[in-house]
């Protein structure tokens, strides 16, 4: 997908970032250490449960050696987990108490041919949601070259004016101030203003 498409639709940026972040090499040692810590086991206790030497477990966790299939069977049996759990990526640790406030009118402007976006909470990294307000400039379905679609789910709230919400598998529907819709963003969708003034909307995209 071209960079121009990402520029046109900020909601695609989150999908792109999430896709890039999800492609990471498996670190079996890190995963094993996470499981052991979650179970509250010391290396010695894990050694007693699995029958593997403490030094062997330490070397596996520090990526100094790769466990054999037989060793992985012992790990799974001793820790009472299914073997596929050893290959799940470790859960990302997220700091608690994060906050990113955006004062009215102080979002990051991002104008396009069909929308005038104002990106919100732009200082916070690794967000699970991307919120932004948009002025809907488009007045006709024909102003779009194709459906907008991307990974994740999306929530839309009409703040001012009225829009016609087009979606790939449903009839177009008019939405007034205060109306909202939650939908699968993999389904083609687009908006046009149908009020005298360009409508103002709030969009929240989540992976």
Image (spheres, grey):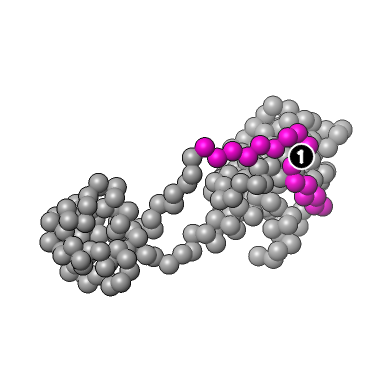
Q: Residue at x 69, y 65 (%)?
A: 2
- Foreground pick, 67 / 7: 67
From the top left corner, tell me how far across and down residue 1 is, in percent.
65, 65
Give the farthest residue toward the right: 196
Decide whether residue 98 is among the magenta residues.
yes
Give the vertical position of 161 relative to 188 (above or below).
above
Side (left or right) of 12 relative to 29 = right
Q: Where is residue 130, by image quadrant?
A: top right
From the top left corner, tell me how far across and down residue 109 is, in percent.
78, 47
Side (left or right) of 18 relative to 64 = right
Secondary structure mostly seen in magenta is loop
Per the image, the residue denoted by label 1 is 106
Secondary structure under tag 1 reads: loop
- Foreground pick, 206 / 97: 97
- Foreground pick, 88 / 125: 125
From the top left corner, tell me how far across and down residue 112 is, in percent.
80, 52
Give the vertical position of 4 relative to 202 (above or below).
below
Q: Residue at x 26, y 53 (%)?
A: 36
Residue 167 at least partly seen: no
Residue 207 at least partly seen: yes
Q: Residue at x 74, y 42 (%)?
A: 107
From the top left corner, tell me how far across and down residue 122 is, in percent.
67, 46
Q: Where is residue 154, by image quadrant?
A: top right
Decide whether residue 17 is among the magenta residues.
no
- Looking at the rendering, the stretch of residues picked out in magenta corresponds to 97-113
Label 1 Cα neighbours within 10 Å, binned few <14 / some 14-19 / many ≥20: few
């Amino acid at each position: 997908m071209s960079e121009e498409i990402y520029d046109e639709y900020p909601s695609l940026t989150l999908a792109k970032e999430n896709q890039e972040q999800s492609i990471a090499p498996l670190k079996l040692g890190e995963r094993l250490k996470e499981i052991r810590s979650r179970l509250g086991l010391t290396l010695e206790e894990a050694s007693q449960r699995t029958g593997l030497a403490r030094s062997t477990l330490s070397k596996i966790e520090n990526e100094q050696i790769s466990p054999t299939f037989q060793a992985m069977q012992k790990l799974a049996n001793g820790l009472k987990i299914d073997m596929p759990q050893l290959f799940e990526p470790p859960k990302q640790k997220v700091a608690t108490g994060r906050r990113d406030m955006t004062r009215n009118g102080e979002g990051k402007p991002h104008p396009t041919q069909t929308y005038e976006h104002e990106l919100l909470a732009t200082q916070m990294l690794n967000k699970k949601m991307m919120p932004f307000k948009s002025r809907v400039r488009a007045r006709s379905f024909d102003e779009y070259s194709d459906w907008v679609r991307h990974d994740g789910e999306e929530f839309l709230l009409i703040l001012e004016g009225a829009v016609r919400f087009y979606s790939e598998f449903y009839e177009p529907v008019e939405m007034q101030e205060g109306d909202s819709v939650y939908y699968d963003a993999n389904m083609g969708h687009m908006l046009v203003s149908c009020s005298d003034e360009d409508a103002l909307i709030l969009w929240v995209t989540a992976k």
